[in-house]
C-alpha cells in the first residue's frame, strides 16, 4: 500500500486529545467530527464522520490502550504504524471491519471521501472477562501488544453499526448532552453485538467443522426453506429437523457458506423485498402488513436499521 500523500495537510493530534477535546480535526475545507459516548466503564462508542474535500492526515500516538472494533460505513481510512521492528500499513475501505489493539504505537492516519466509521472501544481487561475464550490468533496478538485484523463486514454488522451512529447523532441534534435509560441500554447491547460479530468474523473454525458437499446441499435447502415465507422465519430447530443437520451445524454453516447468521440473512432478504415494493409505489402500511408486521413502527425501525432511512422517506425520494 502506498504511503500517505505528502500533499495531505498534517495535523498533530494525539488520540487522547482528540477523544477528550472538542472532537474536531481538519483544515482547508476538510473537517472530521468525532462523537464519543461512554456506555459503561470500559466500553465506549465512537463515531467518526466527515465530508472531506481533500484528505487529512493525523500524527497519532495511542495512549488510550483500548481494543477497538470498527466498521467503515463510508469513505476510506489509511493507517501506518511503527513499532520496534518495522512499519505496518493498512487500508480500511467502506464495507470493511477491523479489530485493532496498538498501545504505545506511533504512526499516521489518513482519511478521505465522505467518511463515516463507527468504533466500539473496549478495555482489554473487560474483554478478557466477557470473552475468556477469544480466538487463539487474536489472543496471541493482543498479548504481543500489536493487533490488526481486517475482514469484510457482514450486512448484519454494518446495519448495527449504522443504527448506533444514527441513534447517537439524533440525540446530539436534539441537544442531549447525556443519553440515559433505555436508549443507553440499547446502545450498550448493540455495542456488544458489534464486538461479537467482529470476533465471529475472525474465528477459526475447527477442521471438523469443514463443510462437505452434502452439508452445503443441506444448507442451501435450509436457506430456501428460510426464505420461502418472508412474513415469518422458521426456527433454527425447524430448519435442522427439515434438513437433517444438527442445530449448531446450521448456525455455523450459514456463517461459513453465506457469510450471514440465519436470522441476519432472513432479515436482509425481508428488507430487500420491502424496498422493492416501496419503490414500486406500494403503501408503507401495506408493505408492513404483507411482510408480517402487525406494528408499522416496528417495520419502520427494522427498515431504518437496514438502509439508514425511514420507509416513508424512501417513498418521498422516489
Image: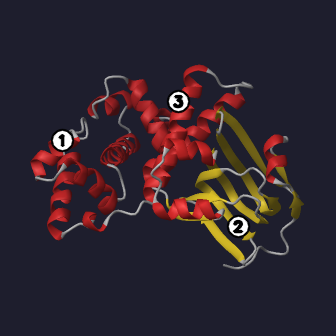
Q: Is residue 118 left or right of residue 52?
A: left
Q: Is residue 305 left or right of residue 288?
A: right
Q: Whole-percent x and y of residue 247?
A: 21, 47
Disc 3/disc 1 C-alpha distance (Å): 28 Å
Disc 1/disc 2 C-alpha distance (Å): 44 Å
Q: Is residue 62 above or below residue 164?
A: below
Is label 3 in contact with label 1 (beta carbons under 8 Å)? no
Q: Nearer the viewer, residue 251 or 137?
A: 137
Residue 239 visible (yes or no): yes
Q: Whole-percent x and y of residue 227?
A: 23, 47
Q: Which residue is mark 3?
A: 186
Q: Residues within 10 Å of mark 3 (few under 14, many from 20)?
A: some
Check residue 79 in the rendering and tell me which mark sits there, or answer none.
Answer: 2
Q: Which residue is mark 1?
A: 237
Q: Nearer the viewer, residue 209 or 287?
A: 209
Q: Is residue 210 above or below residue 193?
A: below
Q: Which is more N-terminal, label 3 or label 2?
A: 2
Q: Which is more N-terminal, label 1 or label 3?
A: 3
Q: Whole-percent x and y of residue 42?
A: 65, 39
Q: Which is more N-terminal, label 2 or label 1?
A: 2
Amino acid at each position: 500500500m502506498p504511503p500517505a500523500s505528502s500533499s495531505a495537510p498534517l495535523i498533530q493530534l494525539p488520540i487522547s486529545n482528540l477523544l477528550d477535546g472538542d472532537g474536531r480535526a481538519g483544515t482547508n475545507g476538510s473537517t472530521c467530527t468525532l462523537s464519543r459516548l461512554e456506555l459503561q466503564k470500559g466500553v465506549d462508542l465512537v463515531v467518526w464522520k466527515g465530508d472531506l474535500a481533500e484528505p487529512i492526515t493525523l500524527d497519532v500516538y495511542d495512549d488510550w490502550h483500548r481494543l477497538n472494533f470498527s466498521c467503515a460505513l463510508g469513505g476510506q481510512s489509511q493507517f501506518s504504524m511503527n513499532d520496534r521492528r518495522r512499519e505496518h500499513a493498512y487500508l480500511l475501505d467502506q464495507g470493511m471491519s477491523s479489530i485493532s489493539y496498538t498501545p504505545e504505537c506511533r504512526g499516521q492516519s489518513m482519511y478521505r471521501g465522505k467518511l463515516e466509521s463507527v468504533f466500539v472501544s473496549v478495555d482489554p481487561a473487560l474483554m478478557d472477562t466477557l470473552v475468556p475464550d477469544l480466538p487463539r490468533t487474536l489472543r496471541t496478538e493482543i498479548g504481543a501488544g500489536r493487533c490488526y485484523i481486517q475482514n469484510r463486514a457482514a450486512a448484519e454488522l454494518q446495519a448495527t453499526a449504522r443504527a448506533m451512529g444514527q441513534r447517537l447523532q439524533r440525540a446530539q441534534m436534539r441537544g442531549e448532552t447525556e443519553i440515559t435509560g433505555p436508549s443507553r441500554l440499547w446502545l450498550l447491547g448493540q455495542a456488544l453485538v458489534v464486538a461479537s460479530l467482529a470476533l465471529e468474523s475472525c474465528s477459526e473454525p475447527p477442521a471438523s467443522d469443514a463443510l462437505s458437499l452434502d452439508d452445503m446441499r443441506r444448507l442451501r435447502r435450509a436457506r430456501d426453506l428460510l426464505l420461502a415465507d418472508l412474513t415469518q422465519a422458521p426456527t433454527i430447530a425447524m430448519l435442522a429437523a427439515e434438513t437433517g443437520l444438527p442445530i449448531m451445524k446450521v448456525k455455523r454453516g450459514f456463517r461459513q457458506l453465506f457469510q450471514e447468521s440465519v436470522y441476519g440473512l432472513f432479515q436482509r432478504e425481508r428488507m430487500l423485498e420491502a424496498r422493492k415494493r416501496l419503490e414500486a409505489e406500494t403503501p408503507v402500511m401495506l408493505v408492513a402488513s404483507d411482510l408480517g408486521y402487525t406494528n408499522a413502527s416496528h417495520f419502520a425501525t427494522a427498515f431504518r436499521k437496514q438502509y439508514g432511512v425511514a420507509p416513508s422517506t424512501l417513498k418521498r425520494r422516489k
